[in-house]
Image: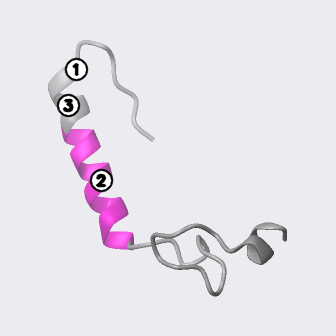
Amino acid sequence: MFNLSSAQGARFAEVCTEMSEQVRALGPNPLGRPAGAEPDGPVPAEAADG
């Protein structure tokens, strides 16, 4: 968690960059797509229903 004031524009940019790097390092969410779904395609209807 980061606590910044509105006067800390430069620090905000640093925090955003740091957070983005951490998320990229984690990689894709392994739970984000159901089995059989294409990486960038729509979720198959049978998987979307539950």
> Label 3 near label 1: C-beta < 8 Å?
yes
Q: How far apart are marks 2 and 3 (CA)?
A: 14 Å
Tell me the residue that label 3 is attached to: 11
Residue 20 in picture, x, y percent from top left: 30, 53
Which quadrant of the rendered structure holds the C terminus? bottom right
Query: How many labels, in total?
Result: 3
Residue 34 in picture, x, y percent from top left: 66, 78
Tell me the kind of residue under disc 3: Arg
Q: What element does badge 3 sit on?
A: helix
| Stretch in magenta | 14-26
Which quadrant of the rendered structure holds the N terminus? top left
Q: How far apart are marks 1 and 3 (CA)?
A: 5 Å
* Residue mark closest to the camera, 2 vs 3: 2
Does 25 appear above or below 38? above
Q: Nearer the viewer, residue 12 or 49?
A: 49
Horizontally, residue 28 falls left or right of residue 14, namely right
